[in-house]
Structures are given as structure tokens and as C-alpha cells.
Amino acid sequence: MNWLPRPAEGQAWVAPSLLSADFAALKNDVDNMTAAGADLLHLDVMDGHFVPNISFGPFICKFVHGLSDLPLDAHLMISHADQYLEAFAKAGVDGLTIHVEAEAEIGSTLKRIVELGMKPGISLNPGTPLADILPWLSEVDLVLVMSVQPGFGGQKFNPVALEKINELKSRRTSEGHDFLINVDGGINDVTGPECRQAGADILVSGSWLFGATDRAERITLLRG
């Protein structure tokens, strides 16, 4: 499996969100981000039900898998994630993150993700209390903290994410967990370092990274 260890203290892996890529030149954008130093690629999957927007599904994930050797982390913003796990496994996804708010039985879905050879992750929206995911911390390899309401790119960062990141890092140490802490939404040269200092291991960035003239410089800045 293509996956990443925890980064060095004070640093973070950088995951460009392909939702902000130019899909008419997707190969060029993937190649460019890889050459710029991206550590993994973030795939935002939206169903038009759990969130109002629709993005793409396993077919595009499979296409990206054929373009890149980087780990692929798919974020399922879909209501019935449990119905599509096999399709994403066949597409070559390495990590699969589901939402605690989704209409799926969390425990069995996480277990099935592992059985299919992927790393399980759990995500929560800005308005969802951290307590809602605590029962699953020992079952996941990644916790994705949303710092914006999922469904659209380009939103402003919600600082409630910093509190959640801090508590997750503390619980990881005190309770002996080994999950990676990921944060997504409004990540830039100000919010990225703030999240990294709070304890984030992965920073997902879309429009701020893809809109840069020098993407390598921005990836280096986020990584720390």
C-alpha cells in the first residue's frame, strides 16, 4: 500500500486537492504538483446529496491512479459511502475517508475499508463536535478535520478546526493512537502554519495551491 508515516514534529505533508485542478489538462496538473513536491493527492468525491455539489467518482480516481505514483486519499462526501467501497478499492485508492454525519454504519464501514486493503479515515464537519468521532479513533488511520463546510472550494477557514486539531493530538498521545491528523478547507500561507503548529500532519490545499505561479514554493511553505 502506498501510504505515508507521520511527518517529523513541526512539519506536515502537503496534499493538493484535485477539485481545484484543470480537468481539461488533468495530467499536466498532476505532473506539475508531483514535480513541485506534493506528498499525496486529495480526491474530493461529492454526491449531490450529502453535499449540494457533485464532483466525480471512482472512474476519475482510477484515471488519477494511472497518472501518479503518489498516495491517493479519497474523501467521500457521500451519504451512503458503504455502497461504494469496492469501487474505490478497484480504482487504486490508498486511503478512504468517510463522514461521521453520513448515512452509513460507521464501524462496519471502517472495517470493510480495511478488508479491501485501504487505510480507513473519518471526517467531521465544522459544526460537528469532536465527541462524535471519539469512539472510532482506535479504528482509523486518519482523522480529517473540516475547516469549512464541505461541498465547495474557496471558502474561508473556520478557526474551530484548530481546537479540534489540538485535542486530537493530545488524545493521540494520551490514548496511544497512531492516526494522522488531516485538515481541509481554506488552507493558505497563514492558516496552514497555524494548523501545522496545532498538530496537523497533512494539509489539504486546493485553490491556493493551484492558483500559484510557483507551486513548489507554496508546498515548501506549507510543509514547514
Image (cartoon, rainbow, N blue to C red):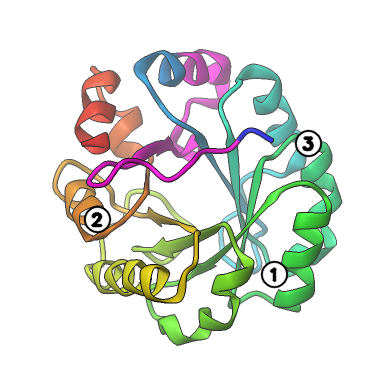
**Residue 97 at x, y percent in the picture:** 61, 57
Task: Indicate whether residue 102 is drawn in magenta.
Answer: no
Precedes in sequence: disc 2 or disc 1 = 1
Relative height, residue 44 to residue 50 (above, below): above
Residue pushed farthest left? 190
Q: Amino acid at mark 3?
A: Ala
User: Residue at position x 37%, y 21% from top?
Assistant: 37
Frontmost residue, 194 versus 1: 1
Relative height, residue 73 to residue 151 (above, below): above
Relative height, residue 201 to residue 209 (above, below): below
Relative height, residue 66 to residue 60 (above, below): above
User: Residue at position x 41%, y 64% from top?
Assistant: 145
Determine the CA span between mark 2 and mark 3.
31 Å
Q: Amino acid at mark 1?
A: Ser
Which residue position is annotated with label 1?
79
Q: Secondary structure at mark 2?
A: helix
**Label 3: few (<14), some (14–19) or many (≥20) C-alpha neighbours in 10 Å:** some
Which mark is nearer the camera, 3 or 1? 3
Q: In the figure, residue 181 lies in which quadrant?
A: bottom left
Frontmost residue, 204 versus 150: 204
Q: Amino acid at mark 2?
A: Cys
Query: Left or right: where does residue 125 sit relative to residue 169?
Result: right
Determine the CA span between mark 2 and mark 1.
28 Å
- Read off the magenta span: 3-31
**Label 2: few (<14), some (14–19) or many (≥20) C-alpha neighbours in 10 Å:** many
* Mark identifier at residue 195: 2
**Residue 54 at x, y percent in the picture:** 62, 52
Which residue position is annotated with label 3?
91
Frontmost residue, 178 versus 156: 178
**Label 1: few (<14), some (14–19) or many (≥20) C-alpha neighbours in 10 Å:** some
Query: Left or right: where does residue 180 sit relative to residue 116?
Result: left
Task: Indicate whether residue 21 is drawn in magenta.
Answer: yes
